Image (cartoon, grey):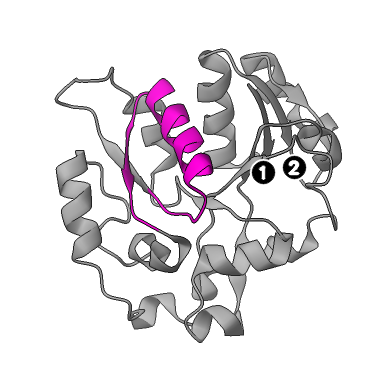
Amino acid sequence: MKIGIIGAGNIGGNLTRRFTAVGHDVRVANSRGPQTLTALAEETGATPATIEDAVRDAEVVVVTVPLKAVPDLPEGFLDGAADGVTVIDTGNYYPQQRDGKIAEIEDGLTESRWTERQIGHPVVKAFNGTFAQDILDKPRPAGDPARIALPLSGDDAAAKRTVTELLDEIGFDAVDNGGQDESWRQQPGTPVYGLAADAAAVRKALEAASPERTAEWRA
């Protein structure tokens, strides 16, 4: 599968490592240009690219940049992707720590719904509450009692199936958290955020979430 990854930080870099390890054709881009991705490319076999080249003909695109940087992505950057492209959003709103105030999110819009509006395409929210190192250290074969599950949210059932299959390939179970309007259950400050546990525990944590942002996660 052709996968374009936009963002080569901790999450983007480790997803590049895992997706290439299971045989996917990965192109990775960042805001500083492909010349800064030589080491990651040499390590993984991924292709360093501009954002437009990373997305071209991609069947899956991972957007893993700070929320404040999402509006700065090139306009129409997904136009060159494959028909029916699945877009994964790993983003979180960190108003005090990084992103500043985003009024729509402060007013109750979910983070990934806001991202959808910025990029003009539906997304599947996934990997946002996962410690980057867990992507490398926690994979287990299907059926292993130590295998952990990751939640995902989105309105496109086919896209969620694609993400579920990718998770399985790289060693994780998936828990469907429902549509994008339920994705607040995965946001920072909720019980599932940072949780490394099996599917039953992840479901329980999602059910226990409160829609009210605590002071730590508000501007």
Q: SS at mark 1? A: loop
Which residue type carries mark 2? Asn
Q: Is residue 93 visible?
A: no
Pinpoint residue 111: horizontal percent, then vertical percent.
52, 67
Sequence-wise, which precedes: disc 1 or disc 2?
A: 1
* Number of numbered discs: 2
185 is higher (above) or lower (below) than 201: below
**The residue stretch that appears in magenta:** 152-178
Which residue position holds label 1?
7
- Is 217 in front, or is 190? 190
Which residue position holds label 2?
30
183 is higher (above) or lower (below) than 83: below
- Is 131 in front, or is 162? 162
Is 26 displayed left or right of 155 in the figure? right
Is 20 displayed left or right of 198 in the figure? right
Which residue type carries mark 1? Gly
- Is 45 in front, or is 56? 56
CA separation in Å, label 1 and label 2: 5 Å
Task: Kindly identify the residue that appears in the image at 63 percent across and 16 percent down.
Answer: 43
Report the disc number at residue 122: none
- Is 66 in front, or is 159? 159
Residue 153 on the magenta span: yes
118 is higher (above) or lower (below) than 40: below
Q: Determine whether label 1 and label 2 are within 8 Å by CB.
A: yes
Q: SS at mark 2? A: loop
| Label 1 Cα crowd, 10 Å radius (few <14 / some 14-19 / many 20+) | many
Residue 64 on the magenta span: no
Pinpoint residue 167: horizontal percent, then vertical percent.
41, 31
